Image (cartoon, rainbow, N blue to C red):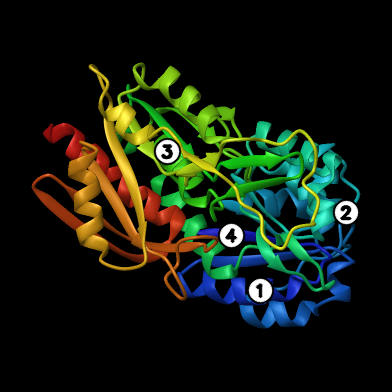
Amino acid sequence: MKRILLGVSGGIAAYKSAELVRLLRKQGAQVQVVMTKSAMQFISPLTFQALSGNPVHTELLDADVENAMGHISLARWADVLLIAPATANILAKLAHGLADDLLTTVYLAATCPVVVAPAMNQAMWNKAVTQENVEKLLRHGVKVMGPEQGDQACGETGYGRMTEPTAICAQLFAQTESGDSKDNHYLAGHKVLISAGPTCEPFDPVRYLTNRSSGKMGYALAQAALNAGAEVTLVSGPVALLAPVGVELIKVTTAEQMYQAVMSKAVSHSIYIGAAAVADYSPVVNQPEKIKKQAEQLTLVLQKNKDILAAVAALNDCPFTVGFAAETHDLETYARDKLTRKNLDMIAANWVGQEQGGFDSDQNALHVFWADGDKSLPMIDKTQLAEQLMALIAEQLKAV
């Protein structure tokens, strides 16, 4: 049975942590909770005690337990230290090794895996110092889940929402179950190239055409490939995500930049997964000055962009090439046509639209096609879906 030590810091998202405890217990985990003083302003320790079945830990210098070195005992007890929500303040403390309360002291004493689920105002998340703190924690081996985009308690919208408890629970168990066993390194020796996120095609200094893509699926695939033992290169359009630790990250903006980056790397990789939502067209002219709102109508002349998937598949020594197809109707017809027309080895197709998962969502479902077969992967968290798709890719790669 897994032993999870849940750290709750002081943000409005602390109410979600109660549901997280319930879900973790439902998975058969033992849960103990550590709360900061500010967390107790948002939710009562009694709530967590009732849900976890264990006393809640709040004091560093607790006369009842300190003789037994309580923070050390908790750190050694845990299989995983999960901090959710992780506020900007707690991230800063962890990144700089401060230990002025029980939670931060437990973190310093922990030798188990540490996972944080950030939650804060979108401006706080986007602040350079917060991103620097997160990058430092990633370098120290801390896993980061989220944050997500959406409406916030302050009334603003953007990235900063804590990942939903169901998704945290799913990712936590998926990561732990995959582990570091050599038996799971089925892509050891392989180099995987993944393109992810949208592209932005400017037509003046402040405006551009783009596609609706969060990059979550591509980034999840990068993590899945790493978990499988592969060497991973991630070519990413503009997203508000942190790349998995260990990947070679190449940031691009336009479709042309993504084409150049992918083509420069493709021949040295054994697998290419085109999960990016690349713009099909770009403006012929990028005006040097902002276009003023004057005429009732504005005409933009667009030109067709290079087809990255088809170009990779056409290489003499091409990698095993996997495409994605997001469709609103006739999914199988369009997916199979794209598979054949672009000479792909495999294509992963998904429905898009209301209640279909896909764009911006933490969940998705795929119908995967190859020359002589297909397989449906039901709606599930994208982290787990990426693991399933990567295993299927490896299976078909062996059959080639």
Q: Which residue is mark 3?
A: 227
Marks 1 and 3, how far apart in space? 33 Å
Q: Does any portion of residue 21 appear in the rendered image?
A: yes
**Amino acid beneath label 1:** Asn
Q: Residues within 10 Å of mark 4 (few under 14, many from 20)?
A: many
Q: Nearer the viewer, mark 4 or mark 1?
A: 4
Q: Which residue is mark 2?
A: 101
Disc ID at residue 4: 4
Mark 4 or mark 3, which is nearer the start of the sequence?
Answer: 4
Q: Residues within 10 Å of mark 2 (few under 14, many from 20)?
A: some
In the rendered view, does 373 fall on the left or right side of 36? left
Q: Nearer the viewer, mark 1 or mark 2?
A: 2
Q: Position of residue 89 (x, y in %)?
A: 87, 52
Q: Position of residue 292 (x, y in %)?
A: 81, 50
**Amino acid beneath label 4:** Ile
Classify mark 3: helix, strand or loop: helix
Marks 4 and 2, how far apart in space? 19 Å
Task: State which quarter of the image contains the C terminus.
Answer: top left
Q: Which residue is mark 1?
A: 54
Mark 2 or mark 1, which is nearer the start of the sequence?
Answer: 1
Q: Position of residue 36 (x, y in %)?
A: 84, 63
Q: Residues within 10 Å of mark 1 (few under 14, many from 20)?
A: some
Marks 1 and 2, how far apart in space? 20 Å
**Amino acid beneath label 2:** Asp
Mark 2 or mark 3, which is nearer the start of the sequence?
Answer: 2
Classify mark 1: helix, strand or loop: loop
